[in-house]
Amino acid sequence: MNKRKTEDVMLRHRPAEILIAGAFMFSLSACVTAIEIGQIAPDSRATALDGASFDLRDAARTHKAVAVLFLSTVCPYSKFFAEEYRTAFGDYRTRSVLFVGVFSNRTETSAEIATYARKHGFDIPIIKDGDDRIADQLSARRTPEAFLFDREGRLRYHGRVESKYRSPDLRNAIESLLHGVPVKLADTKAFGCAIVRK
């Protein structure tokens, strides 16, 4: 085979090699960014809709637990638990548990999110994750989806708020943290709507 034919063959195979390499790099990237149970929270900082600054690691140091909830104004699954969210916010506020609502859907505006939060009495930090940075840092995929961190900033629970059979998985995890015992069911499957990223 002459030099020109050899180069033609190489060029024809190069796109496939690029695709394979790209898929491999994407896989590695997903592994690197995903946070697992027991790992320290990423350096997540944002400005809430009320203008207050939020720092996940600082919040963890000043609370017994921090629950980051990925929510949506339109997802039926997320809206279904609205009353449970509001009740939990009140129940745990005096027990040094901070809830944070993160809205990462690109289709939801800050104004819509603020209106939704007021309507349901969400008296917690509300963040419009416009560039999907927090969702990407935690590898959040659905609404609703919960990430619970302890005082050291370590992830102790990830997954659904409640099961389809109304098992209060997030509350159970919070109670375990507050009582200083291991979370029995630390990683559950969140069900709901996919986060619409950019």
Image: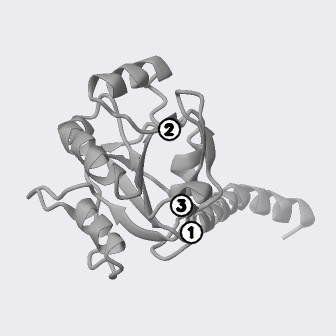
- Amino acid type, label 3: Ala
Label 1 – label 2 distance at C-alpha: 19 Å
Q: Which residue position holds label 2?
A: 197
Q: Which residue position holds label 1?
A: 31
Label 2 – label 3 distance at C-alpha: 27 Å
Depth check, front residue: 95 or 35: 95
- Amino acid type, label 1: Cys
User: Within the image, what quadrant is residue 113 found in?
Assistant: top left
The N terminus: image quadrant: bottom right
User: Within the image, what quadrant is residue 166 found in?
Assistant: bottom left
Depth check, front residue: 169 or 143: 169
Please state the horizontal and vertical placement of residue 102, each as a whole percent of the image.
45, 41
Label 1: few (<14), some (14–19) or many (≥20) C-alpha neighbours in 10 Å? few
- Between disc 2 and disc 3, whose residue precedes? 3
Q: What's the coloring here?
A: one colour
- Between disc 1 and disc 2, whose residue precedes? 1
Q: Are marks 2 and 3 in contact (CB under 8 Å)?
A: no
In this rendering, does residue 192 appear at all?
Answer: no
| Secondary structure category for the residue under label 2 | loop
